[in-house]
Image (cartoon, helix red, strand yellow):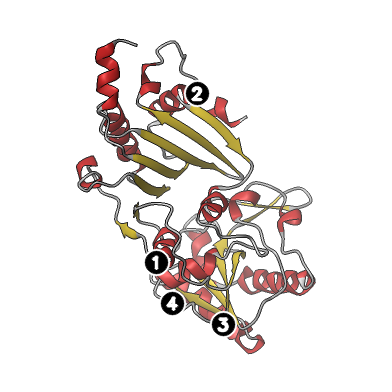
Amino acid sequence: MPVKLANEIDCIHAVKFTVDLELSNVLQQRDLLAKLLSKGKTTLVPMPLEALVSERFSLKAAPDYPLAAISANADGLDAHTAYWFRADPVHLILQRDSFSLGEPVPLSMEVEHTQLLVAALNSHFLSEGLEFMLGNSGNWYLRISEDPKIQTNLPNVAISKNIHGYMPQGAYAGKWRSILNEVQMLFFEHPVNQQRESLANVPVNSIWLSGGGYLPAKSDLQNFELLFADTLLYRGLAELTGTQCRPVPTDIETMLVNAYTHICLGLGTSANTDACLNMLYEALKDRKVKQLTFNIGVYDKCLVAEVTTWDLYRFWRSIKPVERFLT
């Protein structure tokens, strides 16, 4: 290595970024992402992104990662008591002899339609101790008074697959499968779905339960000095760990304004993903950032990639399409 280059690299700010994002169809910067992946070190991890994030914050599946309670508590609901599930409105697609889980999860819905369907659920199930609730974001949650003794699957694990093997498991699985059947019958001819279909929108024909658990106790664990994220999960995790959490900015200078050494950027499927990727690449190239670690969720897997400033000088590495790293 030339002496001049070594000295330049020695001057890199000691800033590392961990970037969590979902590889969605709307991501435009695939060529740039492919370049970064091709230059760095990659590992394919057999777990969805939400599970990887949970493990990073020392949350354990018992039997689910308690994502519902964490998100609900950041979504304007008091999740300090009871057991919580996410209850995402979904569309199940009839296959030849089974059902598969359609995208997106949750389905996008008008506020009025959401309120009507949740009211219908509560009218039917409240007497059984099941309370469906809406957060400030419009997300659906299910609150129950005690541990239901079941294990659920995160929706990204089941998307486009036969749902039979991904339905609730455990001691009371039969009861909960019956509840989900009742939900489907309740939604079958609901006026909301009739209106959705008249507008060429897929009907909401079920809910997907996941992320069950009690709200974890506050922890002094801090994986990062600062979080930039717009999602409920990160806001909830920040509250649990006492980590600062700020909205995703539009410029790198805002992220580097203080002398932080490790920053997390939780993008998920944020509309800012493309701009942030470009911004981080330029910062790495300009040696404003020392290292980028990407955790890229791809359904039931997560692609982990580590890229340093020095890796960008590996001109002999050919650029491979993103899809090549997923097999």
* Residue 256 x/y as whole percent: 23, 43
- Mark 3 = which residue? 122
Could you tell which of marks 1 and 3 lies nearer the N-terminus?
3
**Residue drawn 46% across and 26% down?**
40
Q: Residues within 10 Å of mark 3 (few under 14, many from 20)?
A: some
CA distance for labels 1 and 3: 30 Å
Instruction: State the separation of the CA atoms marked 4 and 2.
Output: 42 Å
CA separation, marks 4 and 1? Answer: 14 Å
How many numbered marks have been drawn onto this rendered protein structure? 4
- Which of the two discs, 1 and 2, labels the residue nearer the N terminus? 1
Mark-to-mark CA distance, 4 and 3: 17 Å
Amino acid type, label 4: Leu
Instruction: Classify 50 as above or below 131.
Output: above
Q: Position of residue 105 (x, y in %)?
A: 53, 55
Residue type beneath disc 2: Pro
Secondary structure of the residue carrying tag 1 is helix
- Pointer 2 residue: 321
Expressed as whole percent of the image width and height from the top left, the position of residue 142 reads 56, 74
Secondary structure at numbered mark 4: loop
On the question of residue 30 being in view, the answer is no
Residue that protrudes farthest toward the bottom in the picture: 127
Q: Earlier in the sequence, mark 4 or mark 1?
A: 4
The residue beneath circle 4 is 77
Residue that appears at 72% across and 50% down: 162
In this rendering, the label closer to the viewer, 4 or 1: 1
Q: Does label 4 or label 2 sit earlier along the sequence? A: 4
Q: Report crowding for label 1: few under 14, some 14 to 19, many 20 or more residues within 10 A (C-alpha).
A: some
Residue ID for mark 1 = 239
Kindly identify the amino acid type of the residue bearing the numbered disc 3.
Answer: Asn
Amino acid type at circle 1 is: Glu
Tell me the quadrant of the picture where the N terminus can be found: top left
